[in-house]
Each structure stands twice: as structure tokens, then as C-alpha cells.
Image (spheres, rainbow, N blue to C red):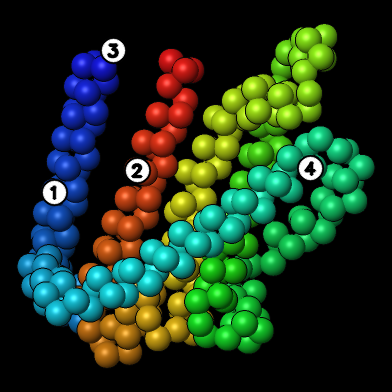
Amino acid sequence: MGRGFGRAFRGSAALSIALGLLLVVAWQVLAVFGHYPSHMLPLPGVVVAKAWIVLANGTLWRHARVTLWEAGAGLALGTSAAVITGYALAKWERFERVLSPYIAAAQSVPIVALAPLLVVWFGFGLLSKVLVCALIVFFPMMVNTMVGIRSVPPDLLDLMRVLRASRWQTFAKLEVPSAMPMLFAGLRLSVTLAVVGAVVGEFVGADRGLGFLVSLGRGLFDTPLMFVALLALVLLAVSMYVVVLAAERKLLAWRR
């Protein structure tokens, strides 16, 4: 099974690389034959040269590290709060009836509209960006937690009662393993949303981060710098997503 998975993974990786190369070729063709000026659509080679410059002087890593920290801290905070809230809503219906309208109302407010308020309340520092990330990942993780906890087979719950299992034993031995697939599904979505939240917060007000680098490139009409920052954001989000996939595969190996 391991060798079969390895071959499948290498085949998928090869296809992904081939698709990426095809997109780069299409980008090159469009920029050359479309006669776009460099400030609108720079050539891939120009973007690579710019990337080399900001990598060599440390600018890209300095800003990427800030965005990574904001997204990671916001993901941890939002996920923790969402799992606790989702579990409480799944186990106690009265709690759900009381809080659900307020949670839905809060979710209806666009994070782009809420981010400026958070910056006003908590300043231009790290905290406001972390809170933006936490808020944007909260709802999907909470919903997935509720669905996961409620997906526990009633027969197994009855069995745990017959065996006189404690509440903690039922939680640790039955509810958590049963909810893990849904929790990881929510986490896969949340890691990319956390990066989006960090960028939104940096757009509103920051002097560091990849979102700030995009804004700086826009202000200087430095389109290659904007492309470099956007590609760095993509790599950051994909890297976090791959880490979650690896953890999911390891922790849910029993399902296979």
C-alpha cells in the first residue's frame, strides 16, 4: 500500500509541476504577443529577477515571516475557540438555540468591513491581524466541529453508556476519533483562510508582511514586486495546506 501511495503521489506531483510549467508558458505567450507593458503584465523572467533581488537582500523572508506568524497564531486561536464552541453547540441544544443567531449574524459581516474596526480598537500591531485571522477561520471550524460531533453513531454512544464509560472516556475514545475527519476538513479550509485574513489585516494597516509588500508594489507601480509577493502568499498557503494534509494522513491512518 505504501509503494502504491508513493507512486500515486509522485504521479500527482509530476502532473502538478507540468500544469505549473504550462501556466508559465501561457503567461509568457500572453505577455509577449499581447504587447502588454511591464507595469501591467511583466514577463516571468522579470518576476524571477525581482524575486532573486528581494530574496538576496532578505526583504521577502522578513515580510513572509510576519505573515506566517500572523496566520499561524490566528489559526491556532480561531481553531481553538471554534472547536470549544462547536462542541458545546453540538452537545447542548439550548446553548445552540441561544447562540446560533448571534454567530450567524456575526458571520454575515464581511471581514473586509470588520478589519478596519479591529485596527482602530487594537492598533496597527500584530494583535489586530491575529484577530482578523481568528475570526475568518472561526465559523468553518465551528460548523465542522458540530457536524463531526453529531456524526457519532448513536449505537456506539449507547455502547459506551452500557460499558459505564465516563464523560472523558466517551469524549477521548469515541467522539474525538469520530469527529477527526470533519475537523481536518475544516482545518484544510481554515489554513488558506488564515492567510487571507492576514493579508486583509495588512492591507488595512501595517508596515510589514506580504500584504504590505503588495500594497508597496502597487504604490510604487512595481508590478514585478506585486507578483513576487502574491506568489509568496500562494507558496505560504500551499505549504501550510500540505502540513495539514500530512498530519491528517498520519493521525487518520487507522481509517485506511
Residue 45 shown left or right of residue 11 in the figure: left
Tally of numbered tags: 4
Between label 1 and label 4, give the one nearer the viewer. 4
Nearer the N terminus, badge 2 or badge 4? Answer: 4
* Residue behind mark 1: 21
* Residue behind mark 3: 1
Between label 2 and label 1, give the one nearer the viewer. 2
* Residue behind mark 4: 88
Label 4 and label 3: CA atoms lie apart by 39 Å
Q: Are marks 1 and 4 in contact (CB under 8 Å)?
A: no
Between label 1 and label 3, give the one nearer the viewer. 3
Residue type pointed to by label 4: Ala
Nearer the N terminus, badge 2 or badge 3? Answer: 3
Label 2 and label 3: CA atoms lie apart by 21 Å
Label 2 and label 1: CA atoms lie apart by 20 Å
- Which mark is drawn over residue 242? 2
Between label 2 and label 4, give the one nearer the viewer. 4
Q: Residue at image x 53%, y 62%? A: 74
In depth, the one of 6 and 114 nearer the eye is 6
Nearer the N terminus, badge 1 or badge 4? Answer: 1
Instruction: Give the image location of residue 15, x and y in percent.
Output: 19, 35
Q: Kindly indicate the quadrant of the structure image that contains residue 156.
A: top right
Count residues near mark 1 (Cα–Cα under 10 Å), then give few for <14, some for 14-19, many for 20+: few
- Which mark is drawn over residue 80? none
Residue 62 seen anywhere in this rendered image of the structure: yes
Label 1 and label 3: CA atoms lie apart by 30 Å
Give the SS element for disc 4: helix
Q: Residue at image x 63%, y 87%? A: 120
Nearer the N terminus, badge 2 or badge 1? Answer: 1
Q: Residue at image x 57%, y 76%? A: 128
